[in-house]
Image (cartoon, rainbow, N blue to C red):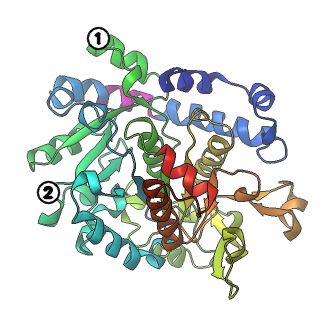
């Protein structure tokens, strides 16, 4: 079945139908959580659909789609035999910034055919990364408003000239036109949410299905989806995908510590002050053991501690987990590495009642039930992937089986 067809099927499926196909959901993703994801998507579409549809019409009428085209146009298969690294803005990114810089510089010196990674930055981290000398291949945008203007258009260092913007056709025409006028390229995708399919089909008279993508709410989920669907990479490494913030009585400290670069201004400008949320979940921290072992699951002590989150961030987390367990990409032997070293992604609870949330024994990691999902330190994920590629090149099988599968599928 084609991915486009599977997306359509996944959008319609109920929890009971999903449970029948994927009994592994039982005890991991609850019916309440699954239905909350769908309800949240409907609410988001309800609030934003008019803006999205108007933006899409404008981006066709102003010639941006025609001039720059979809991501699939000339980037299809670009990630084969490579791992996609999605760079989010969560505070934990600071733990890996030095490693990321080293890998970007080393990999960037190679010819494209010899490269091992594709780097996709969130719009929030685009400018901070450039100032650190880290040049991403792509920056991805899902926000339809103009509030991202300072992040993408103002005081951009010259080393960012060749970074390609991956944007939803629903994104702000003002932002996209200015980006293009600055001499930079855009590649579009079409959101699989709401009426975007109908809008594009009716207004531009094209079949939108080949260009549609599951977004999953935030840009890192979208990067994972597009990495598989278009770039055809089957290994994804997520950095800074915390989906949470430290608990603190001082709201200004919560805002300051929300992002790796401490810049909360876009949230305030967008009237979306997530730091006000009182919702809590358990976040994880990784600590190396002192025991040398080939079992990657025994390399770390995993601690959990209470962190703050919001309903929307929690939806992004649950969307990711549900799709890793039983997704529209189930026929692809992919591997998802959560290298954030912090946050709530992959931190699961057997019982999400008030009593259960306060019972430490209820908490477990998604790795325990999902062989496609791996909680790793970034340098360990890099090593595992590169060893697997080398092993497949020389026909050696003395590496982790999961890594061999990743390299074979990539």
Look at the image and give the residue range highlighted in magenta: 48-55
Q: Position of residue 21 (x, y in %)?
A: 76, 28
| Label 1: element kind | loop
Image-quadrant location for residue 181: top left
Which is more toward the observer, 109 or 38?
109
Q: Main structural element of the magenta stretch: helix, strand or loop?
A: helix
- Please state the horizontal and vertical placement of residue 163, each as a whole percent of the image: 21, 54
| Image position of 170 (left or right of 215) | left
- The answer to whether residue 240 is visible is no
Residue 89 versus residue 92 in the image, above or below: above
Q: Is residue 377 magenta?
A: no
Residue that mark 2 sits on: 161
Q: Residue furthest bottom?
A: 290
Q: Nearer the viewer, residue 137 or 391?
A: 391
Compared to 194, does 216 lie above or below?
below
Residue 303 position by quadrant: bottom right
At horizontal 37% and vertical 41% (from top left) the residue drawn is 231
Q: Which mark is residue 299?
A: none
Give the position of the N terminus as an image quadrant: top right
Image x and y of residue 43, in percent: 57, 34
Toward the front, the furthest residue is 395
Numbered disc 2: secondary structure: loop
Of the two numbered discs 2 and 1 in the rendering, the one whose residue sits closer to the viewer: 2
Residue that label 1 marks: 205
346 horizontally vs 255: left or right = right
CA–CA distance in space, label 2 to label 1:
33 Å
Left or right: where does residue 380 sit relative to residue 147? right
> Quick check: marks 2 and 1 in contact, CB under 8 Å?
no
Residue 15: x and y in percent read 76, 30
């Amino acid at each position: 079945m084609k991915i486009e067809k599977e997306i359509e099927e996944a959008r319609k499926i109920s929890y009971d139908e999903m449970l029948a196909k994927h009994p592994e959901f039982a005890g991991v993703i609850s019916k309440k959580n699954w239905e909350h994801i769908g309800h949240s998507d409907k609410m988001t579409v309800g609030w934003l659909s008019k803006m999205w549809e108007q933006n899409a019409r404008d981006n066709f009428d102003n010639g941006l789609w025609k001039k720059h085209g979809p991501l699939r146009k000339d980037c299809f298969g670009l990630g084969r035999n490579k791992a996609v690294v999605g760079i989010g803005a969560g505070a934990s990114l600071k733990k890996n910034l030095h490693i990321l810089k080293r890998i970007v510089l080393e990999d960037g010196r190679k010819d494209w055919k010899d490269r091992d990674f594709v780097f996709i930055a969130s719009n929030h981290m685009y400018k901070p990364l450039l100032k650190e000398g880290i040049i991403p291949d792509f920056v991805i945008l899902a926000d339809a408003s103009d509030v991202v203007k300072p992040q993408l258009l103002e005081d951009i260092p010259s080393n960012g000239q060749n970074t390609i913007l991956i944007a939803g056709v629903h994104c702000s025409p003002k932002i996209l036109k200015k980006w293009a006028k600055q001499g930079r390229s855009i590649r579009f995708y079409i959101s699989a949410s709401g009426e975007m399919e109908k809008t594009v089909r009716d207004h531009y008279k094209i079949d939108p299905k080949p260009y549609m993508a599951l977004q999953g709410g935030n840009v890192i989920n979208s990067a994972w989806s597009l990495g598989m669907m278009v770039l055809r990479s089957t290994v994804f490494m997520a950095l800074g995908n915390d989906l949470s913030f430290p608990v603190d009585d001082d709201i200004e400290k919560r805002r300051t510590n929300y992002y790796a670069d401490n810049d909360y201004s876009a949230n305030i400008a967008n009237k979306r002050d997530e730091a006000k949320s009182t919702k809590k979940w358990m976040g994880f921290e990784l600590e190396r053991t002192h025991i040398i072992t080939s079992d990657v699951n025994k390399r770390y002590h995993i601690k959990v501690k209470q962190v703050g989150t919001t309903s929307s961030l929690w939806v992004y987390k649950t969307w990711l987990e549900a799709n890793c367990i039983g997704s529209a990409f189930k026929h692809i032997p992919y591997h998802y590495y959560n290298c954030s070293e912090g946050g709530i992604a992959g931190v699961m609870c057997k019982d999400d009642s008030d009593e259960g949330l306060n019972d430490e024994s209820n908490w477990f990691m998604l790795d325990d039930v999902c062989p496609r999902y791996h909680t790793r330190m970034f340098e360990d994920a890099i090593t595992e992937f590169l060893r697997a590629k080398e092993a497949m090149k020389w026909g050696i099988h003395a590496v982790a089986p999961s890594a061999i599968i990743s390299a074979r599928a990539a």
